[in-house]
Amino acid sequence: MSKNVAVVTGAGSGIGQAIASRLAQDYALINIDINGENLAKVEREISANGGDVQSIVGDVAKRDTHIKARELATTKGTLTAWVNCAGWTRGAALHDFPNDPKVFEELMGTNQNGTFWGCAEAVHYFVNHKIKGAIVNISSVHGRRAWRDHAVYEMTKGAVDALTRNVAVTYGPYGIRCNAVAPGAVMTPALAQSFVDAPDPKARRESLELLTPLKRIANASEIAEVVAFLLSDKASYVSGQSLAVEGAWTSALGVGDIDEQLARSYGLDPKTGLPLG
Ligand SMILES: NC(=O)c1ccc[n+]([C@@H]2O[C@H](COP(=O)([O-])OP(=O)(O)OC[C@H]3O[C@@H](n4cnc5c(N)ncnc54)[C@H](O)[C@@H]3O)[C@@H](O)[C@H]2O)c1
């Protein structure tokens, strides 16, 4: 029987790497990343664990990268899953916006255009081979809530959610599903670097933990599990959704009050709800 194949973009690091490692249990993989060195490392790790993986070094902003992945998938088995995860953020104030493609064109290119071309090539394959495939796009809490100086990032993630709905509605009649996962704070090299860059890294980290009702930052594997579920037949009636995986962050009206007595009985700081010590 032909193997099921999944494409994962941004597989060289962080959430994309965790998704690739998780999906290697169920699929032959085609990993894409612009960082060839990291991609090769991930390929070695997955292969060492018995996974079937091939890598494409490329920029997701370019349609050709996705065409290559689609063509390679055809030679490996049956493409049934595609995850658009490559993305990044860079803040900049709108009232004094820099003349720098990194904070506009390149950011839009990766997050928005990259997801668009990924979806386009995935459905091209699914339709041409009459496959009831599934797509997961990695969005963000920034697609639904605002944070100072993140206008461009938030536009791209709002666009990812809109594209997800469009693909789900247009191709639903043919059994193709498309969902997004909108993570909150996830411990990845990108988030770790944002702490390093902050004036007070510890305070920056704690501010995110405080804002999140679960009072902690997610592991990338916690996002990967949800992606695996959404791609699987267990989610056969889930489509067009952007599922927030953010420890209830976007349900909260700011940093809520803590029941001090209850927090103490759990051994937590009664003021913050964070672990003591
Ligand atoms: N970490 C978080 O807290 C968080 C929260 C919400 C959403 N996200 C989203 O999750 C996704 C992954 O983020 P992460 O934190 O794992 O970041 P990361 O930097 O650890 O990994 C991102 C990967 O994407 C690759 N990449 C970047 N631009 C690319 C391009 N043009 N073409 C191909 N590959 C490219 C990078 O080389 C890197 O390997 C992004 O879409 C991000 O917006 C992250």
Image: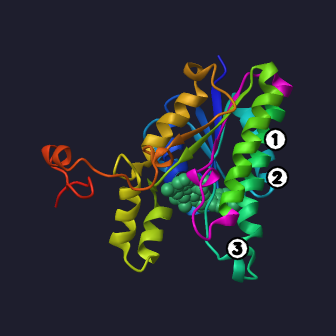
Asked whether the residues under the numbered discs 3 and 2 touch, taking CB atoms below 8 Å apart as contact, a structural biologist would say no
Residue at left 57%, top 63%?
A: 147
Horizontal arrangement in the rendering, residue 37 relative to residue 49 (left or right): right
Q: The N terminus appears in which quarter of the rendering?
A: top right
- The residue indicated by pointer 2 is 63
Q: Which residues are magenta?
A: 127-152
Residue at left 22%, top 54%?
A: 275
Q: The C terminus appears in which quarter of the rendering?
A: bottom left
Which residue occupies the foreground of this view, 47 or 113?
113
**What amino acid is labelled 1 in the image?**
Ala
Was residue 145 drawn as part of the magenta stretch in this picture? yes
Residue 130 placement (x, y as % from top left): 81, 21
**Nearer the camera: disc 3 or disc 2:** 3
- The residue indicated by pointer 3 is 102
Which residue occupies the foreground of this view, 131 or 94?
94
Asked whether the residues under the numbered discs 3 and 1 touch, taking CB atoms below 8 Å apart as contact, a structural biologist would say no
Q: Secondary structure at mark 3?
A: helix
Q: Secondary structure at mark 1?
A: helix
Identify the mark nearer the N-term, 3 or 2. Answer: 2
Asked whether the residues under the numbered discs 1 and 2 touch, taking CB atoms below 8 Å apart as contact, a structural biologist would say yes
Identify the mark nearer the N-term, 1 or 2. Answer: 2
If the picture is divided into quarters, which one holds ligand 1? bottom right
Q: Residues within 10 Å of mark 2 (few under 14, many from 20)?
A: some
* Residue 128 visible somewhere in the drawing: yes
Residue 85 placement (x, y as % from top left): 62, 49
Q: Residues within 10 Å of mark 1 (few under 14, many from 20)?
A: some
What mark, if any, has residue 120 been given in the picture? Answer: 1
Which residue occupies the foreground of this view, 10 or 55?
10
Q: Secondary structure at mark 2?
A: helix
* Residue 40 visible somewhere in the drawing: no
**What amino acid is labelled 2 in the image?**
Arg
Residue 190 placement (x, y as % from top left): 50, 63
